[in-house]
Image (spheres, rainbow, N blue to C red):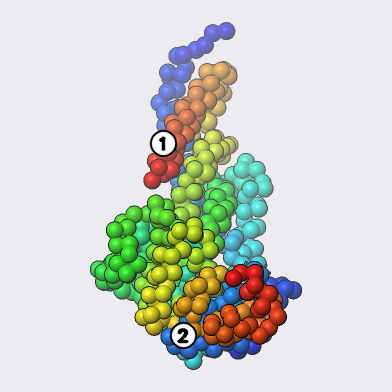
């Protein structure tokens, strides 16, 4: 479903991704962990080309998204992204946030977009918030709305960049719950997170990144109990 | 010192007409300037240096040279290229619009750049094009922040429009000067004109404050 080949990314002189090769299968949940500055966000942002790619290829369902002739907007409709800072549109109500892209990009009729939006709000447990502005919501609620907004485009893949890192601890659970549900429904997901419990429970595979490389990857049960690499060991000993 | 109310009364109809033209000049200047300024501001933030440089130069020129000179250039140089007989009002509107466009462009630019980068990224990640993201997400938020400085620009333009009296556009200052020439009096014409400008700017800032408060509570 996603195939990353020899991906390299530099910001000026600073090479942030050095040689990344990953394959993600359909319905798979891949969790990316690693210390701050290791390139996790950059890696995710390359997959929907929020960052330009310095070298290498990325294929999504066989389509080379690094090719200049590929319509990147089309690709992005298939790849949803959830950000640490939510990035809801503050000038629009919750339901308008969700309906905007389906209407403007997918050209869905308004009624239909609203219906679908309400359905998604029910799914994340916030249908009573349809007509309020994001400012009046808690962090956990905002992030659930952001997930619903991404889902409204009916993506085949969802990328999560530390979706719970900006939340108060008591709100982390409600967001993880929505993500677990999504995984159960078979969504293909790449999740950058520090929530090791989530990684263990939901992840099919864990990737440990450090210094722009994938240092180690394995199924959660293996990587958490029996890490092979020294760097993985020392990272895990700090976070577990 | 005697103060001749009678000549003010005599000139009242002209001063009134002049005031209306002053308002007309400033309103059209700020309206056209806003439309032009939006495009120039958007042009300036284009990443490609070659495309953005004309916009950068435009802003630098109109902000870096006196409005007085711009009015003269437009009146005696630019307008005669297009219409046979040059016209102070037309030249005034053009010069004020071009000038305010440069200031408005900067207002737009800083308004747009003050919107969190995450807004553009979220929009793009949802499949919107750059133009769609600007139109539906960035600009509507930027507009709100732009209204106060835009109002200030309007007030500044209202005062600056007095300069176009040098090309005989019969606005407020033109009539005040005519009064001064006819009667050789200083205080009556210029105090009266000042008072009218003051009332206009005070009313405008009052309205602007109310609008700002309304927007803030929204
Ligand atoms: N837009 C940018 N311009 C220049 N350097 C950048 C940019 N974005 C990221 N970097 C650099 O790239 C490196 C990797 O950043 P990245 O955000 O991918 O790390 P991360 O693993 O997500 O870290 P964190 O856990 O703190 O989010 C860092 O050294 C960062 O300073
Ligand atoms: Mg990050």
Q: Classify residue A181 as left or right of residue A34.
A: left
Quadrant in which ligand 2 is drawn = bottom right
Local packing at callout 2 (Cα closer than 10 Å; few below 14, some 14-19, many 20+) is some
* Between marks 2 and 1 in the image, the one whose residue lies nearer the viewer: 2
Q: Residues within 10 Å of mark 1 (few under 14, many from 20)?
A: few
Residue at screen point 43% across, 65% down: A173
As drawn, A86 above or below B142? below
Q: Position of residue A88 (x, y in %)?
A: 44, 61
Quadrant of the rendered image containing residue A177: bottom left
Look at mark 2 in the image and give the residue it sits on: A28
The residue closer to the viewer here, A73 or A93, is: A93
Q: Residue furthest front?
A: A225
Between B20 and A81, the one lying in front of the other is A81
Quadrant location of the C terminus of chain A? bottom right
* Quarter where residue A97 is shown: bottom left
Labels 2 and 1 positioned on one and the same chain: no
Residue B17, picture quadrant: top left
Q: Using residue A216 as the reference point, say whether residue B6 is left or right of it.
A: left
The single residue placed furthest to the bottom in the displayed view is A62
SS for dot 2:
loop
Name the residue located 50 percent from the left edge and 78 percent from the top edge.
A200
Q: Is residue B51 visible?
A: no
Q: Is A180 situated above or below B70?
A: below
Residue for badge 1: B210
Ligand 1 within 8 Å of the CB at mark 1? no
Q: From the viewer's perspective, is residue B171 above or below residue A38?
A: above
Label 1: element kind: helix
Q: CA distance from mark 2 to mark 1?
A: 55 Å
């Amino acid at each position: 479903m996603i195939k990353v080949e020899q991906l390299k990314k530099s910001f000026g002189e600073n090479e942030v991704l050095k040689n990344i090769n990953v394959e993600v299968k359909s319905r798979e949940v891949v969790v990316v962990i690693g210390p701050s500055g290791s390139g996790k966000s950059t890696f995710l942002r390359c997959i929907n080309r929020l960052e330009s790619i310095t070298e290498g290829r990325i294929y999504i369902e066989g389509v080379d998204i690094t090719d200049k002739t590929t319509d990147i907007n089309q690709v992005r409709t298939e790849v949803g992204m959830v950000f640490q800072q939510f990035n809801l549109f503050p000038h629009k109500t919750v339901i308008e946030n969700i309906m905007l892209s389906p209407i403007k990009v997918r050209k869905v009729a308004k009624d239909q977009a609203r219906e679908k939006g309400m359905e998604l709000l029910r799914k994340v447990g916030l249908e009573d918030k349809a007509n309020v502005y994001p400012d009046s919501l808690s962090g956990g609620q905002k992030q659930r709305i952001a997930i619903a907004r991404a889902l409204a485009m009916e993506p085949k893949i969802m990328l999560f960049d530390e979706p719970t890192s900006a939340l108060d601890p008591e709100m982390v659970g409600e967001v993880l719950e929505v993500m677990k549900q999504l995984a159960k429904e078979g969504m293909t997901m790449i999740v950058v997170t520090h929530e090791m419990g989530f990684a263990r429970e939901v992840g099919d595979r864990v990737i440990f990144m450090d210094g722009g490389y994938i240092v180690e990857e394995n199924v959660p049960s293996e990587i958490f109990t029996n890490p092979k690499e020294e760097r993985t060991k020392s990272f895990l000993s700090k976070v577990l | 010192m005697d103060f001749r109310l009678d000549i003010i009364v005599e000139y009242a109809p002209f001063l009134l007409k002049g005031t209306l033209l002053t308002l007309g000049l400033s309103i059209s200047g700020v309206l056209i300037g806003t439309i032009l300024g939006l495009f120039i501001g958007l042009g300036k933030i284009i990443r490609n240096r070659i495309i953005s440089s004309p916009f950068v130069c435009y802003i630098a020129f109109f902000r870096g040279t006196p409005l007085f000179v711009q009015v003269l250039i437009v009146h005696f140089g630019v307008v005669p290229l297009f219409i046979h007989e040059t016209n102070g009002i037309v030249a005034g509107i053009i010069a004020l619009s071009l000038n305010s466009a440069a200031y408005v462009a900067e207002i737009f630019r800083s308004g747009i750049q003050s919107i969190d980068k995450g807004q553009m990224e979220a929009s793009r990640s949802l499949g919107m094009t750059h133009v769609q993201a600007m139109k539906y997400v960035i600009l509507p938020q930027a507009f709100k922040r732009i209204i106060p400085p835009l109002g200030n620009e309007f007030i500044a333009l209202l005062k600056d429009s007095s300069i176009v009296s040098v090309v005989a556009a019969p606005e407020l200052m033109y009539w005040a000067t005519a009064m001064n020439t006819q009667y050789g009096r200083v205080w009556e014409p210029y105090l009266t004109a000042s008072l009218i400008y003051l009332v206009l700017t005070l009313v405008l800032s009052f309205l602007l404050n109310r609008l700002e408060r309304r927007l803030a509570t929204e």
